[in-house]
Image (tube, rainbow, N blue to C red):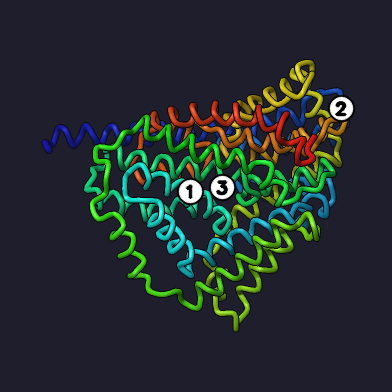
C-alpha cells in the first residue's frame, strides 16, 4: 500500500473516531440535560412525581443511547431515587428483592450446566444426525435444535455461540465460502430464531422480566406451563416458516453434504459415551423442566425451582458446577433486570405510572374495541416502541407496568395483554435491538440487509400467527 493511501486511511479513521466521540458526548449531554430540564420545569404535578419521572427519564435515555452499560445506568438511577429522597432505600432497590432477577440468575446457571457438561453439544449433534444430510434438512435441524436448546440453555446469546460452533464446522464440511448462501442462511436463521424462541418459552431475560412485571403490576399468576402452551403452536409454525423463508432467500449452492451422517457420527464419537457429568446435568435439567411444565398442579414458582436446581448443581459432592463457575457468570443482566423492576416500583409509589399510562395509551385506547383490533394494535405498538429502546429487556421492563396498569383500569385481561406485548418484542429489523442479534452478526456471515429482510417477513408472519392464536386458541386454554 502506498504512503498516500495509508495516510488517507489514517485520516479517515481519525475522522470517524472524532465523530464517534462527538456523538457519544452528545448522548451524554442528552442524558443529563433533558432530565434536569424536566426536574425544574413548572409542571402541574406533585414534586415527588415530577422528580421521580426526571430520574426515570435519565435511566430510559441512558438505555436508549447506551452511554454506559445497562446495569450501571440502572444502578445510578436507583441510587438517585434514594439519595435525592424520592423514595426510601427499600423502594429504590426493591427490584433486588423480587424473584425475577434471581430467576434470570438461575437461567445463567442452567446455561453453564448445559455447556460445561457437554449436554448441549451432544443434543445438537444427535438431532442433526437424525434429521438428515441435505442442506435443507440440516437447516431444519439447526432451527429445531435452537428451539429445544431453549429449554436447557435459556440464554439466546449462549445458544447462538453453541450453534455457531456447529455451523462453522458444517460450513467447512460443505466447503462453502463465507459469503455463500449456505453459510449466510445457517448463521442468519440460527441467530434470528434464537431471538424469537426466548419469547415463546419463559426462559430468556426478556420473557422473565415481562413475567415478573405482569405478576407485580398486573396481579396475575404467570405459569411456566401456561406460557409454553400459549405459544406452542406458534413455536411449531415458526420453525417451519423460518426454514422455508431461509431456503427461499438463500438457496444453497450445494444441496447435499457428502458423508453427512458420518460427519455427525464422528463428532458424537469424539465426545465419547455419556459422561457422569452429562448424566447428572440431564437429570437436573430434566427435573426442572418437569416441575415447570406441571406448575399448574403444584404452583411452585418457576424462579424457586430454577434457583433451587441451579444452587444444587453448585454443591460440592454433586460435581457439576464449581465455585469458579460463579466467578465466570455475567451478573450485569441480573442487576439490570433488578434495577428496571425497581424503577417500576418507584413509578408506582410516586404515582408516575398513572401519568405515563394516561399519556402513552390515550392515543390508542379508542381503537381497542374488540379482540382483533386490540391484538393488532398492541402487537404493532410494541414493535414500534422497541425501535426506541434498543434492549428488549429495557423495552419490556419500562413498558410492561404501563400495559398492566392500563389493563386493570380498563377491565381487560392483564395476562392476555402482557403475553401479546411480550411477543411483540420478538420482531426486530436491526442488530442493535437485541444482544442475541449482535452476537450472531459479529461472526460476519450475514449483512444488515439480510437481517432486515428476514426480520420483516418473520415479523409479519408472527403477527398473522398471533392474530389466529389470541381469539381462537387462547380461549381454549383459559386465556379469554
- Identify the residue at image location x=80%, y=58%: 297
Q: Name the residue under label 1.
A: 144
Residue 74 location (% of width, % of height): 66, 47
Residue 77 visible to the viewer: no
Q: In which quarter of the image is residue 97?
A: bottom right
Q: Which of 24 and 105 is in front in this view?
A: 105
Distance, label 3 to label 1, CA atoms, is 33 Å
* Residue nearest the viewer, comparing 18 with 393: 393
Q: Quadrant of residue 313?
A: bottom right
Where's residue 21, x and y in %?
A: 44, 36
Tag 3 near tag 1, CB within 8 Å = no
Q: Name the residue under label 2.
A: 410
Query: Is label 3 in a helix, a strand or a loop?
Result: loop
Looking at the picture, tell me which residue is in the foreground, 457 or 14.
457
Q: What element carries label 1?
A: helix
Give the mark nearer the N terminus: 1 vs 2. 1
Amino acid at each position: 500500500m502506498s504512503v498516500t493511501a495509508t495516510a488517507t486511511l489514517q485520516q479517515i479513521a481519525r475522522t470517524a473516531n472524532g465523530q464517534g466521540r462527538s456523538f457519544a458526548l452528545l448522548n451524554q449531554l442528552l442524558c443529563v440535560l433533558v432530565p434536569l430540564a424536566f426536574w425544574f420545569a413548572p409542571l402541574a404535578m406533585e414534586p415527588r412525581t415530577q422528580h421521580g419521572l426526571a430520574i426515570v427519564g435519565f435511566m430510559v435515555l441512558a438505555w436508549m443511547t447506551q452511554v454506559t452499560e445497562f446495569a450501571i445506568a440502572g444502578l445510578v438511577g436507583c441510587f438517585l431515587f434514594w439519595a435525592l429522597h424520592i423514595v426510601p432505600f427499600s423502594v429504590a432497590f426493591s427490584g433486588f428483592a423480587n424473584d425475577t432477577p434471581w430467576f434470570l440468575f438461575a437461567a445463567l446457571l442452567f446455561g453453564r450446566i448445559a455447556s460445561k457438561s457437554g449436554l448441549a453439544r451432544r443434543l445438537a449433534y444427535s438431532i442433526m444426525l437424525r434429521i438428515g444430510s441435505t442442506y435443507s434438512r440440516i437447516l431444519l435441524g439447526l432451527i429445531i435444535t435452537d428451539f429445544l436448546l431453549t429449554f436447557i440453555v435459556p440464554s439466546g446469546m449462549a445458544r447462538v455461540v453453541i450453534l455457531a460452533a456447529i455451523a462453522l464446522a458444517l460450513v467447512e464440511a460443505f466447503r462453502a465460502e463465507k459469503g455463500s448462501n449456505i453459510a449466510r442462511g445457517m448463521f442468519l436463521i440460527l441467530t434470528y430464531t434464537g431471538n424469537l424462541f426466548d419469547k415463546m418459552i419463559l426462559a430468556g431475560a426478556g420473557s422473565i422480566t415481562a413475567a415478573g412485571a405482569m405478576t407485580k403490576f398486573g396481579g396475575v399468576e404467570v405459569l411456566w406451563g401456561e406460557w409454553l402452551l400459549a405459544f406452542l403452536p406458534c413455536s411449531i409454525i415458526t420453525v417451519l416458516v423460518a426454514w422455508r423463508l431461509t431456503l427461499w432467500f438463500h438457496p444453497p449452492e450445494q444441496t447435499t453434504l457428502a458423508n453427512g451422517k458420518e460427519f455427525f457420527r464422528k463428532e458424537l464419537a469424539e465426545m465419547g459415551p455419556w459422561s457422569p457429568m452429562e448424566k447428572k446435568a440431564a437429570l437436573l435439567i430434566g427435573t426442572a423442566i418437569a416441575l415447570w411444565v406441571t406448575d399448574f398442579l403444584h404452583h411452585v414458582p418457576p424462579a424457586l425451582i430454577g434457583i433451587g436446581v441451579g444452587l444444587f448443581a453448585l454443591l460440592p459432592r454433586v460435581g457439576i458446577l464449581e465455585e469458579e463457575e460463579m466467578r465466570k457468570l455475567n451478573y450485569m443482566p441480573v442487576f439490570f433486570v433488578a434495577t428496571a423492576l425497581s424503577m417500576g416500583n418507584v413509578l408506582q409509589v410516586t404515582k408516575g405510572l398513572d401519568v405515563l399510562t394516561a399519556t402513552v395509551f390515550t392515543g390508542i385506547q379508542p381503537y381497542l374495541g374488540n379482540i382483533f383490533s386490540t391484538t393488532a394494535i398492541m402487537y404493532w405498538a410494541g414493535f414500534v416502541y422497541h425501535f426506541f429502546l434498543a434492549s428488549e429487556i429495557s423495552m419490556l421492563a419500562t413498558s410492561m407496568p404501563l400495559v398492566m396498569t392500563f389493563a386493570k383500569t380498563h377491565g381487560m385481561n392483564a395476562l392476555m395483554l402482557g403475553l401479546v406485548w411480550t411477543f411483540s418484542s420478538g420482531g426486530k429489523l436491526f442488530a442493535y435491538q437485541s444482544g442475541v442479534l449482535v452476537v450472531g452478526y459479529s461472526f460476519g456471515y450475514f449483512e444488515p440487509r439480510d437481517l432486515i429482510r428476514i426480520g420483516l417477513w418473520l415479523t409479519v408472519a408472527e403477527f398473522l400467527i398471533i392474530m389466529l392464536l389470541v381469539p381462537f386458541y387462547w380461549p381454549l386454554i383459559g386465556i379469554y
